[in-house]
Image (tube, rainbow, N blue to C red):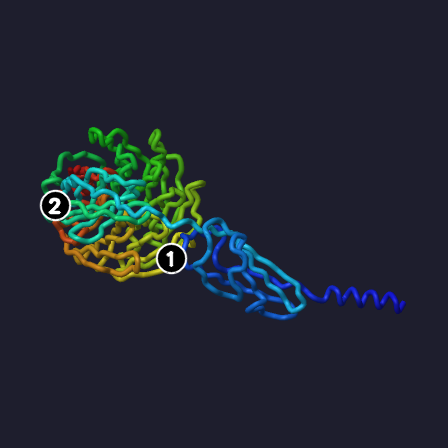
Amino acid sequence: MKFRIFIEYQILLAQANISPTATITSPSGGSTYTEGDTISFSCSGDDAEDGTLAGSSLVWTSSIDGEIGAGTSFTTSDLSMGTHTITLTATDSEGATGTDSVSITINPVSSDTTPPSDPTGLIATAVSSNQIDLSWTASTDDVGVTGYNVYRDGSYLKSVTSTPTSDTGLISSTQYCYTVSAYDAAGNESDESDEACATTGSFGADYPNTVIDTIPVGSGPHAIAVTPNGSYVYVTTRYGDTVSVIQTSDNDVVKTISGYNSPRGVAVTPNGSYVYVTNFDNDTVSVIQTSDNTVIDNIPVGSGPYDIAVTPNGNYVYVIIMHGNTVSVIQTSDNTVVRTIAVGSGPYGVAVTPNGSYVYITNSADDTVSVIQTSDNTVVDTIDVGDNPVDAAVAHDGGYVYVTNHYDDTVSVIQTSDNTVVDTIDVGDNPLAVAVIPNGGYVYVANYYAGTLSVIQTSDNTVVETIAVAAGFGVAVTPNGSYVYVTIFSDETVAVIK
């Protein structure tokens, strides 16, 4: 018995010392450096008996250069070229060890010190009131040209990989001057090219903004939406209980879909396959299949569904429930309501950011805009705007939201980065609908009582033109930005503006 106890005691003694752990925290495995770069090394070492290890207990070695340092941190710029396996060895007081390793690569210093040739033949051409196109003769390099730096009026504008390029979002009737330089992979940059200047056109010159057609539709045309390919326009007729389908190639009504109950909002899915329509009087949303323009579903939602918007991925539809002060979220895979979100008083308009992360809701009764975060469908912000906000449109880069304030004849401009109102623009009497053209240069606002359409230039948020269109109620822009469709509520027509 004593012999057995002695053996077990010896075994326990032999097992008492636990090897330390070694962990490299820097550099990361797979990192690459250039010969002569200063590289920082850091780590941790822990031992069950000795606690935290430091100093000579932590030794760093390279598979190429041997021992390169010791301790929890150090720097070196002396590593040789090649791929190194860096090993950290932690040793405790009993001599037990633990290791960790990473692989890093040291590349040779580039021998390329020759910059590319200077770009030549730079031409600046104003193609519209807010866009200038640039082209030049490509540079050459002994190794290869990586890209070009574009400068506008002496300041860096952007980098591009090749010629040509465009500068957009400019102010009309304004001169801009440009130069271009070339650079290679080693960071060598050429001198700048000779300067080329161009003056953007006046707004009316390239956007005549004239009414070229008037299309009869049903009684009380309300909302309007264009398909993603620009081929068709869907119009809800509030008193006619129909949806008119306009073919844009000849602006003829090719189908009138009946069976609605005071239809108000309309939205097309990103793939163009379905159209969602709110029925204000029977608390449903109808789903139209665009392949044959038939209604394939009617979805119960809350009381008084009004405006509607589809997320960019097409997975969800957000519906204003005016009487309930809520927003219903429809899942398009099965057309069921998966969430109801409380917002402000008198919700009216809805707009989704291009990345689908946020939904902006205008609350007409309390003069605010609610911001919904789509990841969890919670209201994350409430923004004070003007009197009786009704509609909203998001710029195509997602940077700004434009909100029409019906009673104080203004448009509030919300900066989405911090949800603050950065500008308030005076427009016509009782603005209702708002839409942004695809290139983001202009915003169209339908002023109902004024019988006009205000055109806002987004570069400086000024009204650059006012177009007579009678009582405009809804507004939509074709994907190519060439045409604007406006529902004329009193005339039972849709005006087409070029």
Which SS class for mark 1?
strand
Image quadrant in which you'd find residue 422: bottom left
- In the foreground, 390 or 376: 376
Label whose residue precedes the other's in the sequence (1 or 2): 2
Which residue is found at the position 37% from the left and 60% from the top?
A: 380
- In the foreground, 178 or 42: 42
Q: Is residue 20 above or below residue 195?
A: below
Residue 376 image offset from top left, x and y in percent: 43, 54
Q: Residue furthest right?
A: 1
Q: Which residue is mark 1?
A: 342
How many C-alpha atoms fall within 10 Å of the one at disc 1: few (<14), some, or many (≥20)?
A: some
Residue 317 image offset from top left, x and y in percent: 37, 45
Q: CA distance from mark 1 to mark 2?
A: 53 Å
How many C-alpha atoms fall within 10 Å of the one at disc 2: few (<14), some, or many (≥20)?
A: some
- In the foreground, 57 or 431: 57
Please give the count of numbered marks on the rendered protein: 2
Residue 321 image offset from top left, x and y in percent: 34, 51
**Is 355 positioned to the left or the right of 28 in the image?**
left
Q: Which residue is mark 2?
A: 197
- In the foreground, 361 or 439: 439
Quadrant containing the N terminus is bottom right
The type of residue carrying mark 1 is Ala
Q: Which mark is residue 474?
A: none
Asked whether the viewer can see residue 448, the reply is: no
Disc 1 to disc 2: CB gap under 8 Å: no
Which residue is found at the position 63% from the left and 70% from the top?
A: 50
Image quadrant in which you'd find residue 96: bottom right
The type of residue carrying mark 2 is Cys
Residue 280 image offset from top left, x and y in percent: 32, 46
Q: Which label lies toward us, 1 or 2?
A: 2
